[in-house]
Image (spheres, coloured by chain):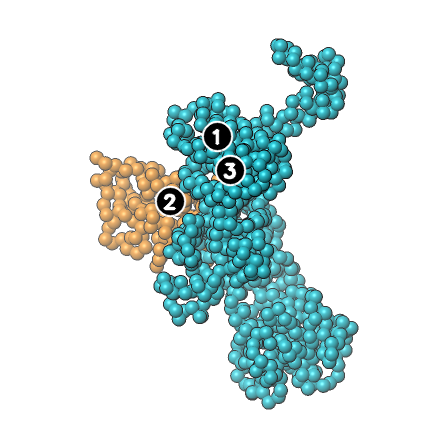
Chain colours: A cyan, B orange
Amino acid sequence: MEDLGEIVAEFLLESHENLDQIDRDLVALEQEPNSRDLISRIFRAIHTIKGTSGFLAFSRLEKLAHGGESLLSKLRDGVQPVTPATITVLLAMIDGVRSILSSIEENGTENDVDIDSILAQVHAQMNAGEAAAEAAAAPAAEAPAETAETAETAAETPVPLEEAPPAVRPEPEPVEEQRKPIGELLVESGGAQPQDVGSALAQQLEGDERKLGTILLEEGKAKPAAVNEALQQQAPKRSIADSAIRVDVDLLDTLLNMVGELVLARNQLVRGVMEIGDATLVRSAQRLGMITSELQEGIMKTRMQPIEHIWSKLPRVIRDLSNSLGKKVELVMQGKETELDRSLLEAVKDPLTHLVRNAVDHGIEDPERRIAAGKGPEGTLTLRAYHEGGHVAVEVADDGAGLDVDRIAQKAVEKGLLRAEQVPNMDKRDIMAMVFQPGFSTAAKVTNVSGRGVGMDVVKTNIENIGGAVSVDSTPGEGTVWRLTIPLTLAIIQALTVDCGEQRYVVPQVAVLELVFIDGNSTKIEYASGAPVYRLRGKLLPLVRLDRTLGLDVGGDQGVYIMVLQADGRRFGLVVDRVLNTEEVVVKALNSRFKDIGLYAGATILGDGKVGLILDVSSLARRSHLTADADRKSLEGSSRANAAAGTGERLLVTAVGERRVAIPLDTVTRLEEFPRERIEHAGSREVVQYRGQILPLVRLSHLLGAYGEEPEGDTVSVVVYSEGGRSVALVVDRIVDIAENSTTARRDAEEDGLVGTAVIQQRVTELLDVRRAILAADPNFYSDLENDEMLVEA
Amino acid sequence: MASRQFATFEVAGQLFGVEVDTVQEVLSYNEYTPVPLAPPAVGGLFNLRGQVIAAVDLRVQLGMARKALQGPVMNVILRGDGEPVSLLVDKIGEVVDLDDERFEPPPDTLSGPTRELVVGTFKLDGRLMLALDVNQAVDTYRATT
């Protein structure tokens, strides 16, 4: 590299960028073959490469680019249509250019790169040009395979320049190519006659050094206004190219450190000034403080790049791969503006590419099998990126056949990763996660893309190295979602600052659903056998006290805030003393010695220069024992007839006539109030319309034979129970309380509809047979879930 | 004669020293963010030019009660393994050049948590300096009894 002139280095860097853009444009061109804009842009870029390589005496490169240019000019002039075959050849040509560039970069020559076979393809395409579409179809069948091979070699050849300082510049297009000559603009707008422009140009050629517009003006051939307008038309194009510059990352890092020093100096200055107490000085110091903070933030942001940066190479990957496999894949990108720190982007690039290749190779089926499965022949691959719970999630989702859990389990047993007797008790997702084990591959045949059993474990290792996590979820026949959760190290997030005790903490705003102020009167925290809950619009929200969780002194229940948070699909309330404000914070990785605590996602520097800890919402959720599995199990367990059998269970106590009836809290999905007039009748049953569904009602008073006075009032209180997408509502007179069934004094049921009676809160309370009650409302409730015998019994 | 440079500081009246190469800088700071549930030896976190630094309370590491973090406290910031970490000390001493012949292993009578942190004793004029094992000194998961 030492003997490479600066010009060559610049040429290489710029060409690599241009090539990436051409790749994207070519794939886009295939989608809209008639886009003249795209063709011209590709043409211009190739032209630039050709021109510069001629100038630098890289003759093979020039020849290759020239070939591509000739083919493109035919497309541009409409002599030849854009077909997938032409695109394939053009992409192969681009790969050829790439390998020549790499060769130049490595050893300064271009001689060992074979361009003849590519040129032959290019010429074949041009000759096939005016022949009919059939002629074009034949090479199309062969060409993709070749392209895939080329792509493979290209991917394996190290291309160090791609690792070079990142360009902040979006569109590397030479200014000259973009600007239309002023004469042309004037003729188009009617501001000047073509022959006048022609003669003015001729004058310039003869040595007139005046500018074209000046000549026209001075000779009275054009009006000043028209020339001005034309000049302005030229101007904005220039500003696009000038609006961004290349910056060395090392320089940014140095700046970042210096800003850090500045912050410290500012803090010391501010302290000193405060001691002196001079009002003018204090104002200046505050102003300096603000500027410093903004400067720091600005420098931080320069390191952030949208994930689009690494996604942009994927359309090409997918196209080549799907063509070579004979599959059709549509790529959908969501959230490509999501920003990540540059260093993290680099680390995510390879794992992401692997997941995408894997999804095209194994996830999406070939068109025949898709049609056989009743799907469209074209598969969809969705890339999704978004902020969640203080992390950035990146998903690769396909709508293919999904993972075969049984096969994975079988394979895992064969490989000795699992014992056969473990499998039946394992969660489906845990079995799927076996694919991340080293040496694991279920691919029936090994392709050159994937299936060699290397990859998924590497994906996992790479992501875990940057403190992230990988997971997979799949539905047979519907597809698979691979999910990378990437930490926000250095990322900037929106966050809420809260006070708890004497300290300030930071909660990522993405996790926050709403805030509730607890005044102790109209809103209050209630306790279900010591476990704090809050009634959020009728539904019980489990609460976590931040002070208790952090082992601090526990404060009161009044004048506090509940932050309704969501993480891992669970919802809970975090009780804090005060919610201050939202601000953008820069997430700093926390020293490894604090990782074991598990409560902190990172740290940040707050507005006052102090360090604030960022809470890890997911782990708070786990601390509140809200794991999805535990919850589901308790629901399943209690829906069986043994409800309320154990002690220590939480019960919802309701009033039905004179009686107290307890319902296990786990079986309660929501508490609702319905206006009495909304109750309608379907056959002999009562129903209400509820969230777009028909919700069957059962009056516990009828079920339990407690006929008495209908309670007064315009509304009825109901307890909604949902399972597997179906819901029923149990009508009670009143919700009394939530209590713990800690008593041993109980008798088994003698009455229909009850499992027993117990003494709860010093009063005899009947324990409802929830299953019986549900079947009374909807006899078919369990028919999907269990067998007919049960129904007969009901 | 081989000699080494030590940065010295005092904790509870005792002079300690660490080799100068391990020290990044020394500064006084007065706002520390406590980390609930962290090991007791963690005094808190502070902002060093935009970097979050953990301050290890050397008193706790030496088996004493926590240092009261009120007002400015002196930090000896060590380069650490990959990321800087700070030791909270009472007072900063000078940098001293010490010949190896002044070195002796820790006295047998030295016991308790201090013994694990100290690699040796240097005889200065009029007082003794205990040379600290830097890695042990910042290891907050070390059992302090």
Q: Regarding mark 2 in the picture, which secondary structure is present there?
A: loop
- Distance from disc 1 to disc 3, alpha carbons, whole Å, reads 12 Å
Residue B80 badge: 2
For the question of whether residue A457 can be seen, the reply is: no
Q: Which residue is mark 3?
A: A89
Please tell me whether mark 3 sits on a helix, a strand or a loop: helix
**Screen quadrant of the N terminus of chain B:** top left
Count of residue discs: 3
Q: Which comes sooner in the sequence, label 1 or label 3?
A: 1
- Circle 1 SS class: helix
Crowding near pointer 3: few (<14 within 10 Å), some, many (20+)?
Answer: many
Report x, y in % for residue B16.
33, 45
Q: Where's the C terminus of chain B, which quadrant?
A: bottom left
Q: Give the alpha-carbon distance from disc 2 to disc 3, as whole Å.
A: 55 Å
Please name the residue shown 66% across and 62% down the image. A519
Instruction: Identify residue for label 1.
Output: A64
Q: Alpha carbon of mark 1 to alpha carbon of mark 2: how far? A: 54 Å
Q: Residue at x 57, y 36 (%)?
A: A131
